[in-house]
Image (cartoon, rainbow, N blue to C red):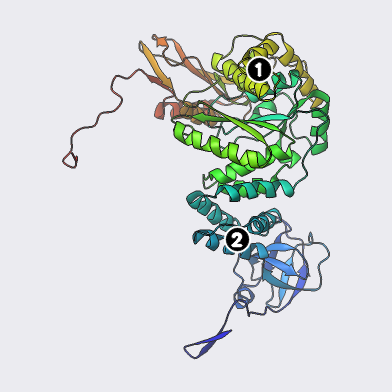
Amino acid sequence: MKHKKNNTSVITMDELVRTPLRVIRRRIEGFSFAKVFLHPETGKAQHLAAGTLVQLLPTEIVAKIIYSDAVSKDTVMVSTELKDMPDYVQLEPSSGHMIVNQLFHKKLDGEKLSASDIRQLLRAIDTGAVEVAQLGALATLFEIKGLDPDETVEMATSIVEMSRPLEFAKKPVVDKHSIGGVAGNRITPIIVPIIAAAGLTIPKVSTRAITSPAGSIDAVEVVMPVDLSLEEMVRVVNKTGGCIVNGESVGIGRVMDKFIGVLKPLKLDPIPLMVASILSKKKLAGSQYVLIDLPTGEGSKLPRRRIARELAHEFSRVGYRMGLHVENVISPGIRPIGRMIGPALEMIEVFKVLENKFASRALIKKSLSLSGILLEMTGKAPRGAGYGIAEHILKKGKALEKFKEIIEAQGGDPSITSESIPKASYRHLVTADISDTVYTVRSSSLVKIARAAGAPWDRTAGVIIYVDHGDDINPGDPLFEIWAESESKIDAALYIAEQDPPVVLEKMVLEYIPMTVETEY
């Protein structure tokens, strides 16, 4: 439809017909294949801004526009990486671009997203037909407005439908997932061999660290390859009963990884997307029983227990509708679980637990507690007896034997021990300078120090903590030790430790609030 404004005829975007452009093929270093180069005047004439995702009709190729004066006004330059290109193409905004716009306004107006809406959105994300800025805006809206249970379930089931679920020879299949946020919480490489040694199947698909000093994959990669293909993963699990592999390499639920990847710089983690992503991946991995670990406390992702309970109920509700048996535990999240923080350090402590050597009591208890619950969920142990059975498997060396079996099946050296894991070249011990009592050890501070020391990029970097809540200390007693691969990183970590001390001494006054004239009674 045409409108008159100041005697000028205005054509709506729906009515706009874009002129086909002649294709020039040229190899352009430094750009991926999904780029097209357009003269700025041509872009403005066709209402196509730089950065817009467009479809190159009549092909199904989606590419991003880059303005360049080096291109003539009647041509479009594309990389030679693009195959089967016609001599002329017509550029149209991608369908994904329009889909996200429609869903954004629909959600903004308080309307419910349909199953079709969600499937179209995920397909557009999967094919790369959506701009990062649009996804960021939509995710922000999901953070503010949320998704109702039906929308969350549809999101999760649509992800499953877009992938191929795995099948394993032996059932039942179980899994556990921690939402993270706690230093030294390396329970996965302890739980997996305990559960597999008990005769259950546990295919653990994990991730690398985003904001922590070590994700499960960063740590486990110290002792064995983790970038397995889907076929290799299935082979390992059918042979040993368990695995610990990188989710990126096996490609399970990759469409949600693309969506969530956009959120990392924004530091957003909308609960509905997290629930849908976690449970869809568990379903795709063939799991029937899932245990969710929700660390809670100041400095963790869930600062209040009430929030953790609400999230637990959401996991259970969505899981039930997906045909999963989901149970949850709320665990302490204010203090580190293990005493060693960083990829290699955490694996040293894992091996000490499996070897029945001295290790963090909290790490042992949490690993056995969650293992016991998984055994009880599946009927492998009566309620209340799971901890004892898991402890028996650990103490008898069966878990260590199973873990070495998994290491060998994934291509690692099964002769590795806690003593043979690589150590850092530089170390600095921080000691107490007064007599006092430890009030708390702050997990959030230890995370910052370990990352400043180089973790997770430097595998041997990290922190060892020597004290815990309630410990009495005297001058010269060790508090914590920083490991790094250079003196400069030791200095950087020490600077963080001075600004944000990880060991807080006992306080009789938690906060001082002076009277002010603005005080209301």
Q: Is residue 42 left or right of residue 464?
A: right
- Please identify, in this view, whether the residue under mark 2 or under mark 1 is nearer the observer: 1
State which quadrant residue 84 falls in. Answer: bottom right
Q: Residue at x 51, y 54 (%)?
A: 141
Give x and y (percent) for residue 414. Answer: 78, 18
State which quadrant residue 363 falls in. Answer: top right
Q: Is residue 310 left or right of residue 218?
A: left
Q: Which mark is residue 511?
A: none
Query: Looking at the image, which is closer to me, 131 or 198?
Result: 198
Disc 1, SS: loop
* The C terminus - image quarter: top left
Query: Looking at the image, which is closer to me, 25 or 365?
Result: 365
For marks 2 and 1, the one nearer the N-term is 2
Identify the residue at the far bottom of this view.
7
Query: Looking at the image, which is closer to me, 73 or 216?
Result: 216
To which residue does mark 2 refer? 100
Q: Which mark is residue 382?
A: 1
Quick check: 194 above or below 37? above
Disc 2, SS: helix
Q: Residue at x 55, y 52 (%)?
A: 139
- Quick check: can you spot residue 142? yes
Q: Amino acid at mark 2?
A: Val
Q: Is residue 272 left or right of residue 122?
A: left
- The span from disc 2 to disc 1 (Cα, nearest Å) is 49 Å
Q: Residues within 10 Å of mark 2 (few under 14, many from 20)?
A: many
Q: Amino acid at mark 1?
A: Pro
Give x and y (percent) for residue 71. Answer: 69, 72
Quick check: 388 above or below 82? above
Give x and y (percent) for residue 180. Answer: 56, 32
